[in-house]
Image (cartoon, rainbow, N blue to C red):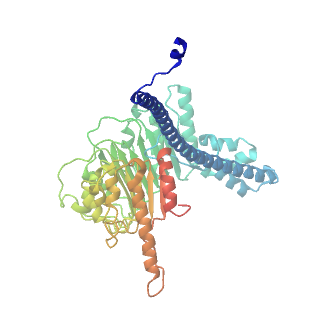
């Protein structure tokens, strides 16, 4: 009886069973929710990794394409070099002793010809030549055989190149060698025009070394034969006082001071009369030769010393044939000037004007405060930090002329900066380099509606070199898309004219180029650019 009673299951209440079931279901649901959250988190992480991998892939693709282009370019260079070597190898060898004298003289001239690599912003002004040492080229040719020596000594043009590129030394024997070198060149060149290249970047005072002072004085005695004169020197200005006499053959004059020194201002000095001077460039020189220069084609002034307006005007007023002017100065004095103090200046052939650092302030004076006439001006280089100040009204004065505008440095961040460009209705090429560009600049250059005038209607080329834009470049892309679409609309409208002519497509960007930008930005913008622009642009 007791055994049977122990096997009977008591009747539990229904609510207790349901509560246990709900508790089990709750635990199961919580476990499943936790698994779901983990799966969703893993999915988000995977998507983020996928996006990051996609970005890395795009960047890698851009880098691979650039590396491939560089490799292919180098391969083409190597192939061209090997092709040239093969052609030379196939040419039958000719005995040099049997060549006619006129042919040998022509070869001598080609071997001794050099081109200067000295520029006002560069370092060394030593020329380059087919010989390892252009300074010793005539002696090398003369040492081959008696016939070559006779021809070399009788060809005076071979000895007209004077290169002084050695640092000053105190060894008396070496000083004698240099003096004899110059004397030999001057004697054997006879009456030929001289190309003189002097590179003494460590000189502080020319008078401190009697040997080099004697060499320079010897060259000055032949100043009437100078055709090219380039000098790179430390801070010595004493050599300038030695320039006396007329230089009827001088065509190129370059002066580069490599060591800055304290100077209150750049001073004007008189250079001997140079009626054939075509190129004139100075860098950090305390003296600027005064004109007139009736044949001058290129003028370059680069200095960190203060430069006065009257100094610049004294140069510009006597340059009737100048085509290119570059003024790169640290500061311009702020003394008040009037129309009477700065006379009218006319540069009828000026096509390229570059104003850097402190020079853009001159632009306002050039166009507004004086009667500065430049009817042929087509290209302007200006520092971007001055674009929203006095240069704005000056650029408006040049609106009917400019075809190419280069803006370097600074920030273009609002409609104020863009408003300076709006009057440039003939501008075809806009080149921005090392400029920070914000969205407001691009938005100000976009038409507000379909019937409004298009800013920069003649623009066909946009080049961005090392610029900083907003992340993704959305505003710039909108500008490019708007210009492209507007160009298509203009083309369609022109094709429906009565005469049936398509007409010029003035509102289409034909070239959009990005240089020296980050690979990530390039990858983000590339697919959109390809969708907007035609292939090859």
* Percent of width and height locating residue 192: 55, 53
Using residue 492 as the reference point, say whether residue 75 is left or right of it. right
Among all residues in the image, which is located at the extreme top?
Answer: 2
Using residue 443 as the reference point, say whether residue 516 is left or right of it. right
Tag count: 0
Tell me: residue 353, above or below residue 85. Answer: below
* Percent of width and height locating residue 215: 48, 38
**Depth check, front residue: 110 or 524:** 524
**Depth check, front residue: 212 or 255:** 255
Q: Residue at x 71, y 45 (%)?
A: 149
* Percent of width and height locating residue 496: 45, 83
- Residue 154 visible somewhere in the drawing: no
**Depth check, front residue: 380 or 22:** 22
Q: Residue at x 49, y 21 (%)?
A: 9
Using residue 58 as the reference point, say whether residue 397 is left or right of it. left
**Depth check, front residue: 171 or 54:** 54
Q: Residue at x 66, y 49 (%)?
A: 77
Tell me: residue 537, above or below residue 164. Answer: below
Among all residues in the image, which is located at the extreme bottom?
Answer: 498
Q: Residue at x 44, y 88 (%)?
A: 498
* Percent of width and height locating residue 170: 50, 25
- Residue 90 visible somewhere in the drawing: yes
């Amino acid at each position: 009886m007791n055994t049977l009673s122990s096997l009977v299951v008591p009747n539990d209440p229904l609510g207790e069973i349901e509560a246990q079931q709900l508790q089990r279901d709750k635990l199961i649901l919580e476990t499943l929710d936790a698994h779901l959250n983990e799966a969703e988190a893993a999915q988000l992480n995977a998507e983020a990794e996928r996006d990051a991998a996609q970005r890395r892939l795009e960047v890698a693709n851009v880098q691979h394409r650039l590396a491939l282009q560089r490799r292919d370019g180098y391969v083409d260079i190597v192939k061209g070099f090997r092709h040239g070597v093969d052609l030379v190898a196939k040419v039958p060898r000719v005995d040099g002793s049997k060549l006619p004298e006129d042919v040998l003289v022509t070869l001598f001239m080609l071997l001794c010809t050099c081109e200067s690599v000295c520029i006002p912003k560069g370092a060394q002004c030593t020329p380059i030549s087919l010989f390892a040492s252009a300074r010793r080229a005539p002696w090398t040719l003369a040492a081959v055989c008696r016939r070559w020596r006779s021809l070399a000594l009788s060809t005076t043009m071979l000895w007209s190149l004077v290169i002084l590129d050695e640092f000053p030394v105190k060894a008396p024997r070496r000083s004698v060698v240099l003096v004899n070198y110059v004397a030999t060149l001057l004697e054997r060149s006879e009456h030929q025009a001289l190309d003189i290249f002097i590179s003494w970047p460590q000189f502080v005072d020319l008078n401190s070394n009697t040997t080099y002072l004697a060499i320079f004085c010897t060259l000055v005695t032949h100043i009437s034969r100078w055709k090219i004169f380039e000098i790179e020197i430390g801070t010595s200005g004493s050599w300038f006082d030695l320039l006396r006499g007329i230089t009827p053959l001088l065509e190129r004059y370059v002066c580069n001071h490599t060591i800055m020194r304290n100077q209150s201002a750049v001073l004007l000095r008189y250079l001997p009369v140079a009626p054939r001077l075509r190129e004139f460039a100075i860098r950090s020189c305390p003296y600027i030769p005064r004109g007139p220069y009736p044949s001058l084609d290129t003028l370059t002034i680069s200095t960190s010393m203060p430069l006065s307006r009257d100094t610049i005007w004294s140069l510009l007023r006597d340059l009737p044939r100048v085509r290119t002017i570059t003024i790169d100065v640290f500061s311009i004095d702020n003394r008040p000037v009037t129309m009477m103090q700065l006379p009218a200046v006319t540069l009828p052939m000026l096509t390229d004007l570059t104003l850097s650092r402190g020079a853009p302030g001159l632009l306002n004076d050039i166009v507004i405060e004086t009667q500065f006439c430049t009817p042929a001006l087509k290209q302007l280089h200006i520092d971007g930090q001055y674009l929203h100040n006095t240069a704005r009204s000056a650029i408006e004065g040049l609106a009917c002329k400019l075809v190419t505008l280069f803006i370097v440095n600074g920030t273009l961040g609002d409609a104020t900066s863009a408003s300076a460009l709006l009057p440039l209705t003939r501008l075809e090429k806009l080149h921005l380099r090392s400029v920070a560009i914000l969205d407001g600049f691009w938005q100000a250059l976009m038409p507000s509606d379909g019937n409004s005038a298009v800013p920069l209607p003649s623009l066909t080329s946009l080049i961005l070199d090392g610029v900083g834009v907003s992340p993704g470049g959305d505003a710039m892309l909108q500008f490019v898309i708007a210009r492209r679409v507007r160009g298509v609309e203009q083309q369609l409208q022109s094709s429906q004219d009565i005469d049936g002519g398509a007409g010029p497509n003035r509102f289409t960007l034909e070239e959009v180029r990005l240089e020296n930008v980050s690979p990530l930005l390039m990858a983000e913008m590339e697919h959109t650019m390809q969708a907007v622009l035609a292939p090859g642009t």
